Image (cartoon, rainbow, N blue to C red):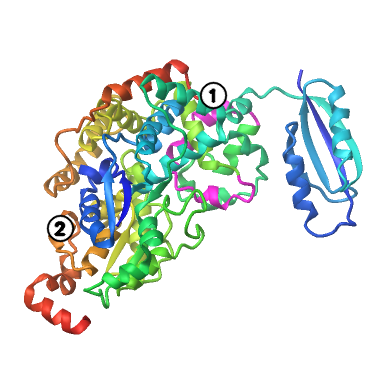
Amino acid sequence: MKYYSYFPGCSSSEGTAVAYGLSTQAIASALGMELIELEDWNCCGSTPYGSTEELEAVCVAARDLALAEKTGLDLVTPCSSCYTTLNKVNSQLKEYPDLKAKVDECLAAAGLKYQGEVKVRHLFEVIYNDIGLDVVKSKVVNPLRGLRVAPYYGCQLVRPEPGFDNPWNPQSIDHLIVTLGAEPVPYPLKDRCCGGSLVIPELDLALGLIHKLLESAASNGAQCIVTVCPLCQTNLDAYQDMVNRKFRTKYNLPVLFFTQLIGLALGVEPKALALDKAIVSAEAVLSPYTKVAEPAVQTRGGVTYG
Amino acid sequence: MEIKAYLMIEMDREDGGDGHRNAVEELQAMPEVVAVAPVSGEYDLVVEATVDIPIRVGVIADKIQAKEWVKRLHVLKVEPAAPNPFLDEVCSTPGGKSIRWCAQCGLCSASCPNVAQMDYSPRKIIALVRAGRRYDILTSNTMWICASCYLCTVRCPKDVKITELMHTLERLSTRHGLSYGRATPAMYRAFIDSIKNNGRVHELGMMTRFYLLTLSTGKMNPLATIKMLPLALKLLLHGRMSIKPTKIKGSEQLKTIVERAQALGGAR
């Protein structure tokens, strides 16, 4: 069992991406991960705070880092925005001593201290590197044969820092899809932007970006899209209807979290994966793979794949 | 008084190999050097340096001359630097200094998903900052429709932190009261208020506050807001919007931290 400090982030804990948090918990122990939720974590501040008040934003994120440091574990988050924000603050504190001194003072006022020792990691990267695709493969009881999936990386998993995957042409989600027995479709826009939180103040702009992403996935034959970011999922899923109306299209592409896709292949009960929280229902696309949960089919599954 | 000096360098080609890149990096590492650019003709590089008193031009020239790869050095021009407080302000922020290295290649603008809707492309914004056009920049829409996708940042051959620059410009625009009429800062405000009140973002509360803020100031038309209701309802029915915010236990602790940060007045 590998132990991690877990930072769900606002949307995955009980907001628009609650299915992400639930499905993460549903697959964690099966993959040999113990995710211990960081006690009393606060919002990382994300882009809006940092783009309004810099020092305040850095201090708010530093509280989380200070709390995480006490646990002595790596801080794992499923949210790409939390991942980028916390990582950025971490490196800024190392790079700019003046900033560090001010942040130290603010934390000290609240009885906290941060030495800069926490490693912030994305859940996907932890599963990809620490758990490893070999182990994931060994646990697959319900291979998703024939399912055509568009691997959507979004922005902040692979950028801005050159991290664990190539920022120019990332491949890791493609590899995961193959591991689960499914088929990654070519997805030229795999690392393009969905608009993020701009969907609220700049709706038309974001709908244009979402439209391109859906078009690219659909025209390459995808039956569904898989993502590693709560914002990407909400934008592509909940706003798909608006895109259809605005651009007179008929997309009906379910958008799954990678944790849900892993869970399906691992034979986790669909209910525990919170698949029913999706606005664009994945039921039709996933029906050949969700039936396995029923005992009779499970036996057949055992014979076929065991 | 600040003084600008332009120095021309002819490199010693005997070494061959990858000396050019190293030379540029060595020059950029000097604190007085503002920019280094290749030139064609008699010389290989032009160096722009800023010094406080004229005599230091000679000191820098000697320092560069002492480098083994310099064959010949010529001080082309020495002039009083036009003051550019806006550039200084931007450069004093974390990562801000990187815009001095921009070569205006335009790869950032070519990479930007939202460039078509921007008043000025990212490349132009950098040129305008360096030209000191504070008002034009801070009243533009460019930084407010940057989606922080970082495509420009990873592609920049000069390692300019363009996304960070956009965040810096957003902060300056807000601080100087030049962001009026834009919807994005209202969303940011609603987002931050939610953190300050609860420690976490409560999406339903944040969205409601955003629409109230924008409706009351006329930034968003009422019809556009009504169009959002079915979406909110759908999310609610799918259990993706919590009605009540979750308040963290350490909300007083967070408040103490934020208040101390406010007292210290920004990160500059």
Whether residue B53 is visible: yes
Most extreme residue toward the top is B263
* Label 1 neighbour load within 10 Å: few <14, some 14-19, many 20+: few
Q: Which quadrant is the C terminus of chain A positioned in?
A: bottom left
Q: Which quadrant is the N terminus of chain A positioned in?
A: bottom left
**A103 or A286, nearer to the observer:** A103
Instruction: Based on the picture, tell me whether residue A167 belongs to the magenta stretch.
Output: no
Q: Is residue A106 left or right of residue B100?
A: left
Q: Quadrant of residue A5?
A: top left
In the rendered image, the vertical position of residue A94 relative to residue A75, given as above or below? above
**B118 or A36, nearer to the observer:** A36
Q: Is residue A200 left or right of residue A287?
A: right
Q: Is residue A223 left or right of residue B111?
A: left
In the rendered image, the vertical position of residue B62 relative to residue A4, given as above or below? above
**B178 or A43, nearer to the observer:** A43
Residue labelled with disc 1: B268
Which amino acid, by three-letter code, is at mark 1?
Arg
Q: Quadrant of residue B224?
A: top left
At which x and y percent is residue B121?
A: 54, 43
Instruction: Based on the picture, tell me whether residue B155 belongs to the magenta stretch.
Output: yes
Numbered tag placed on residue B114 in the rendering: none
Whether residue A252 is visible: no
At which x and y percent is residue B116?
A: 48, 48
At which x and y percent is residue B149?
A: 45, 48
Q: Residue at x 37, y 56 (%)?
A: A126
Residue labelled with disc 2: A272
Q: Which residues are magenta?
A: B131-159
Q: Residue at x 17, y 61 (%)?
A: A281
Q: Is residue A123 left or right of residue A170?
A: left
CA gap between label 1 and label 2 equals 48 Å
Which amino acid, by three-letter code, is at mark 2?
Ala
